[in-house]
């Protein structure tokens, strides 16, 4: 598969044993986020991009070109916004159903659906363990 660059994934507020959110590829999900957000509004669920949170402190350090250790980087992440996983799960489930029923024009629909199923698995674990989440984007 061609490297598409940007990836969307689920960030958990704390670790859940046996769950690795970074296993979600998320590249095709990122590529399709605009169409999925439009579908979310039609479905009256929160768009996935609304769950995005970036640490202002991390963003400023990145813009300044600071070279930080992983511990220093994580210490700057204290200002993320977190959401209840039930709301994210409702959005992902609605989008997955929409994609399979009406998403025939979505490029590589089955791979986007796989990203959504992978996100659903992470969010189901987050609901089970009562762990808040947000959406992260990496390049």
Image: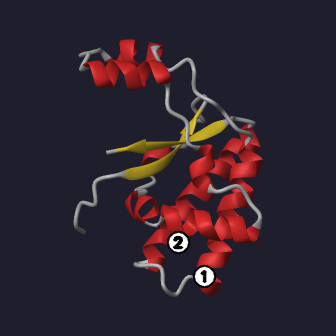
111 and 18: which is toward the camera: 111
Residue 26 sits in which quadrant?
Answer: bottom left
Question: How many neighbours does mark 2 have within 10 angstroms: few (below 14), some (14-19), or many (20 or more)?
Answer: many
Determine whether 99 is above or below 83 in the image: below
* Residue closer to the observer: 88 or 122: 88
Left or right of 84, for residue 15: left
Tell me the quadrant of the picture where the N terminus can be found.
bottom left
Side (left or right) of 31 relative to 43: left
Q: Is residue 80 above or below residue 93?
A: above
The answer to whether residue 23 is left or right of residue 103 is left
Say if mark 1 contacts mark 2, CB within 8 Å. Answer: yes
Q: Based on the displayed image, in which of its 4 quarters is residue 46 positioned?
A: bottom right
Point 30% across, 15% down: residue: 69
The image's colouring method is secondary structure
Which numbered disc, 1 or 2, marks the residue that appears first in the sequence? Answer: 1
Q: Which mark is residue 130?
A: none
Q: Position of residue 70 (x, y in %)?
A: 34, 19
Residue 135, percent across and down?
55, 44
Crowd tier of the residue under label 1, counting other residues whose Cα lies within 10 Å: few below 14, some 14–19, many 20 or above: few
Residue labelled with disc 1: 100
Residue drawn at (53%, 59%) of the image: 118
Local SS, label 1? helix
The image position of residue 73, as x and y in percent, is: 38, 18
Element at badge 2?
A: helix
Q: Position of residue 139 (x, y in %)?
A: 31, 45
Q: Check the image and report above or below for 108 versus 14.
A: below
The residue that disc 2 covers is: 113
């Amino acid at each position: 598969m061609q490297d598409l660059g940007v990836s969307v994934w689920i960030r958990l507020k704390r670790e859940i044993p046996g769950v690795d959110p970074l296993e979600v590829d998320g590249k095709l999900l990122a590529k399709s986020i605009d169409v999925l957000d439009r579908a979310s509004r039609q479905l009256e669920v929160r768009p996935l991009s609304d769950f995005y949170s970036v640490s202002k402190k991390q963003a400023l350090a990145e813009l300044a070109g600071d070279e930080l250790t992983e511990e220093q980087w994580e210490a700057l992440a204290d200002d993320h916004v977190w959401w209840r996983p039930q709301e994210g799960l409702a959005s992902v489930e609605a989008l997955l159903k929409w994609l399979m029923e009406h998403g025939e024009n979505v490029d590589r629909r089955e791979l986007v659906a796989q990203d959504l199923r992978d996100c659903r698995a992470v969010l189901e674990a987050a609901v089970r363990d009562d762990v808040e989440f947000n959406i992260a984007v990496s390049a």
